Amino acid sequence: MPKPNGKLRQCPRCMDPGMLEPFVEEFVGELVTLGHTRLTVAGYRDAACHFAEWLRRCDISLVNIDDGTIARFAKHQCKCTGARRHHHVSAKYVRRARRFVGFLVGRGAVKSVGPNVPTVVSARVAEFQGWLRHHRGISERTVDRHGRMIMRLLAGLGDNPGTYDAELVRRVVITEAQRSSRPYIKTMTTALRGYLRFLAAHGVCRPWLDRAVPTIPQWRLSALPRYLPSADVERLIASCDLTKPHGIRDKAILLLLARLGLRAGDILGMRLDDIVWEEGTLRVCGKGRREVRLPLPQDAGDALLQYLEQARPFVDDDRIFLRSSAPYRPFAGPCAISDVVRLALKRVGIANPPSRGANLLRHSAATAMLRAGATLDAIGTVLRHRSADTTAHYAKV
């Protein structure tokens, strides 16, 4: 939960932000709204005041601020007024100043700075990405990845789809396979098949070229499922510190992963209106944008309710699970959900687990259901498998 903020310490009285003082005060107000502690806000305020005074001393206007300006600020031998005792600017201080500049960019006072360069794709690849979004139902992350892979392949294929033939397609894939890992090249061939189908459907390349893409040998479901025994799963859940907000949150996440076999992306995208408390159900939107309603187990529902009532920050966001420290916002990606599992494994001292991600609990849930007597069809329904062969993988246990 956000810590209460008392009266903020003012900038050193000699540090003069000049014309930027209104922006500094607005910046401070935004930090307070995000839930940062009084000490953190005071540190950001000092850095913003210092950066503003340095701009004034160097006669640098707002329109001339760029990434090079921040680099100059980081290297300057500080002789600015104020209570600072050092003659250098620390990396932490520079990061605070960079965040203030980011705030100015958001307010339109400064043009965009930094090396944030979007992925550049050709017009035809951009059309392919649009087709993936609207007709294939895949995530934005996968759309971006397919676009990058196709742009890499175009160096060998060329920009004119009318010249593509089976020999060229196979040669390009084999060349890439010699310098890439097997899982990576398998994903690349999936993207290439989709791109060739897209081109053929629009009449700009020969039909059936997708069949010329060679198959990369990697036998599906050849290994045993990676899972934890039920006793170890319960130890993970019990290791959460319920005296702290993040412990209450992590217990709810672990229970949902272990009881329903959810994916990390399911947890990441879960929203407040996905829960129907009266019916005891949870709506899950998984791969391919397929929505299903799953029964919410009692212990998972109790943990989720405890998190919502006692530990979830009060912010204007309908995502259920948020960061436990300011700024209170949703997790950055599925890896953050896997980190919850990884830290729990470390707490209970499981030194050599089969894996360390969220899928470990998904596999463990399927294995536990199978050993409890559930049918493969029932397990496939809970895990939302499209193919019965995928569920049959667990029969090996």
Image: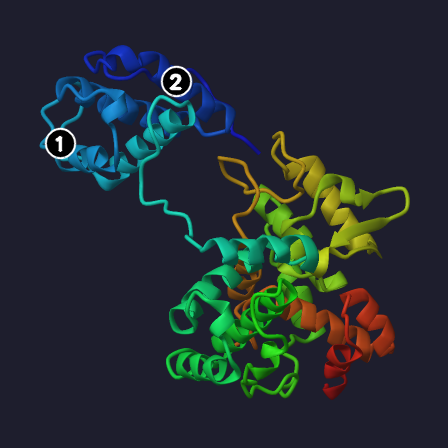
Who's the residue at 18% across and 35% down the image? 89
Q: Please, what is the three-letter code of the amino acid marked with disc 1?
A: His
> Vertical placement of 109 versus 163: above or below?
above
Along the polypeptide, which appears first: circle 1 or circle 2? 2
Q: Nearer the viewer, residue 76 or 361?
A: 76
Image location (x, y in percent) of residue 167: 48, 85
> Vertical placement of 302 versus 317: above or below?
below
Who's the residue at 54% across and 71% down the image? 192
Number of other residues with Cα within 10 Å of mark 1, as a class: few under 14, some 14 to 19, many 20 or more: few
The way the protein has been coloured in the rendering is rainbow
**Local secondary structure at mark 1:** loop
Q: Is residue 349 left or right of residue 287?
A: left
Q: Residue furthest toward the right? A: 279
Whether residue 109 is visible here, answered yes or no, is: yes
Q: Nearer the viewer, residue 283 or 136?
A: 136
Q: Please, what is the three-letter code of the amino acid marked with disc 2?
A: Leu
Query: Residue 225's mark?
Result: none
Who's the residue at 36% across and 17% down the image? 23
Q: Which residue is mark 1?
A: 86
Residue 137 sits in which quadrant?
bottom right
Who's the residue at 40% across and 21% down the image? 28
Q: CA distance from mark 1 to mark 2?
A: 23 Å
Q: Nearer the viewer, residue 244 or 176?
A: 176
Image location (x, y in percent) of residue 392: 77, 82
> Vertical placement of 338 versus 355: above or below?
above
Query: Residue 8's mark?
Result: 2
